[in-house]
Amino acid sequence: MSFDFDGQRAVVTGAAGGIGRAVCLSLARAGARVLAVDLSAEAGEDTADLVREAGGEALFVAGDVSLPETHASYAKAAADAWGGIDIFMNNAGWQGEILSIIDYPLEVFDKVMAINVRGVFLGLKTVLPVMVAQRAGAVVNTASLASHIGSRNLAPYAASKHAVMGLTKSAATEVARKGVRVNAVCPGPVDTEMLRDIEAGQSPDAAEALRAKRAASIPEGRYAEATEIADLMMYLVSGHASHITGQGIHINGGAYGI
């Protein structure tokens, strides 16, 4: 299946690496203009440079997605440069720490919620009016396998990703007759720098054991690659998915539902 997003205007949050960087590059190769958003200015600019090296047009806006001014900034940048937003990959997220509820620091819980829930909400609140005014647009929120199951020692993350699915379904119902679709992808473990960093926070032996245990729990026996998640995101914003909205699409090697 091929994608043609020639001239379309895309915004991707959490664009500095992992899934975000992969989908920025996939969009650019399909002809989209890409505005990358991330807290890390250096890594985010690197993503924009990679898009340009791939022959695409790119902008970068640095900012914290938990803050309204970040969303206002990228929306203005897209409007000034391109006149609107056709594709929104509402992707920024953080897994937090691997700890029991009993031991979980309140400040870390608040940070997980600020990035994963408040950030997604603010993204929808900012971009949906642009798309509704155009009577066209497609959004993909990055949810998780943890949107549907409990995760031992990752309760705040699981709670935040359950919330992302609630936002996805609610937003989809609000804009379904206004030319806009809203869906979510629900990956299992993905081999990204963020996940490797979290695993590395354990002792080396514990990190290796954790990764082996997670991989063994997946019927396919491996983590997903970021490009595989990007492919699904591309499908969901394409015309091939024109009658799909309000859904959380699983991509986890059979870890849920078999």
Image (cartoon, rainbow, N blue to C red):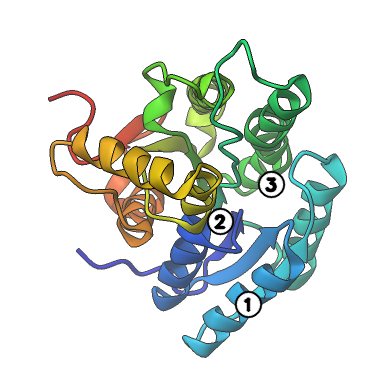
> Does residue 202 appear anywhere in the picture?
yes
**Mark 3 residue crowding within 10 angstroms, few (<14) / some (14–19) / many (20+):** some
- Tell me the number on the disc at residue 143: none
Using the image, determine if residue 185 lies above or below residue 107: below
Q: Which amino acid does label 1 sit on?
A: Asp
Say which of marks 3 and 1 sits in front. Answer: 1
Say which of marks 2 and 1 sits in front. Answer: 1
Cα distance in 3D space between marks 3 and 2: 9 Å
Mark 3 or mark 2: name the one nearer the start of the chain: 2
Tell me where residue 109 appears, x and y as whole percent: 69, 24
Residue bearing the label numbered 3: 130
Q: Which amino acid does label 3 sit on?
A: Val
How many numbered marks does the figure carry?
A: 3
Residue bearing the label numbered 1: 46
**Mark 2 residue crowding within 10 angstroms, few (<14) / some (14–19) / many (20+):** many
Cα distance in 3D space between marks 3 and 1: 27 Å
Tell me where residue 143 appears, x and y as whole percent: 46, 34
